[in-house]
Amino acid sequence: MTNKEDAIDVEFETVQKDGAQPEKKPTSANIKEDNADNDEQLAVFGKMPNKKKQSGMSLPMFTLVAAVCSVTAFYLAGGHVLFENAQPTIVQPEIQPLLQFQNISTNRLARDGSDVLTIEATIINNDKVARVLPPVIVHIGDDPTKRRMFRINRGETLNPGERLMFTNSLPVGKGNSDKAELTFAE
């Protein structure tokens, strides 16, 4: 390495041809005058001529075209699968009733000149806690206008998973149907 004192600056000298004048460096005033004379050069970078003013619809039209293109691209890229099943399918879990009837059977017997319908069924407690049995509603008959309704009051307590078999005899009269439908009173 050399010392800074050993370094020599280079000096440049411009040599002029005989009779030639030194070239002037352009000043900002000269540049403006030159551009005023040559308006056609680089007109792209200059001010736009005051032609017809653009309408205010260019941005909304661009947005609309962009949205249509985006939706079309999404659809073609696999989005059509979403539109094939337009209705959402909600799978509802099958809720088992807390108290449920099983093994319902009926038997018609004649007593004292009238028919008696004997109903046998089993009640199951599907809940996780003990439940008191509500009254049982029995609908007998096929024809809705001639159906007979009976209310059988219960009150037993069933523990979780426990079963209770019961039998009841109801007077139904002659000629009525043996069909019985059991529900719990609410």
Image (cartoon, rainbow, N blue to C red):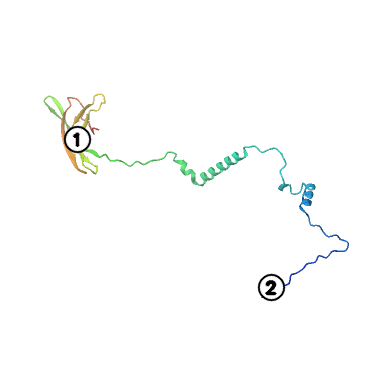
94 is higher (above) or lower (below) than 114: below
Q: Which residue is mark 2?
A: 4
Element on which disc 2 rests: helix
Of the 4 image quadrants, the one containing the C terminus is top left
Q: Amino acid at mark 2?
A: Lys
In the image, 177 versus 104, the foreground residue is 104
- The alpha-carbon separation of the residues under discs 1 and 2 comes to 119 Å
Amino acid carrying label 1: it is: Ser
Q: Residue at x 70, y 74 (%)?
A: 5
Q: Residue at x 46, y 41 (%)?
A: 84
Does residue 71 appear to the left or right of 7 in the view shown? Answer: left
Local SS, label 1 = strand
Image quarter in which the N terminus is found: bottom right
| Percent coordinates x, y for residue 30 in the rendering | 79, 51
Marks 1, 2: nearer the viewer: 2
Residue 47, quarter of picture: top right
Where in the figure is residue 172, as x and y percent of width and height?
Answer: 18, 26
Which residue lies at the image location 16% right of the left edge and 36% below the top edge?
A: 166
The residue that mark 1 highlights is 105
| Dot label at residue 171 | none
Q: Is residue 147 above or below residue 89?
A: above
Number of callouts in the render? 2
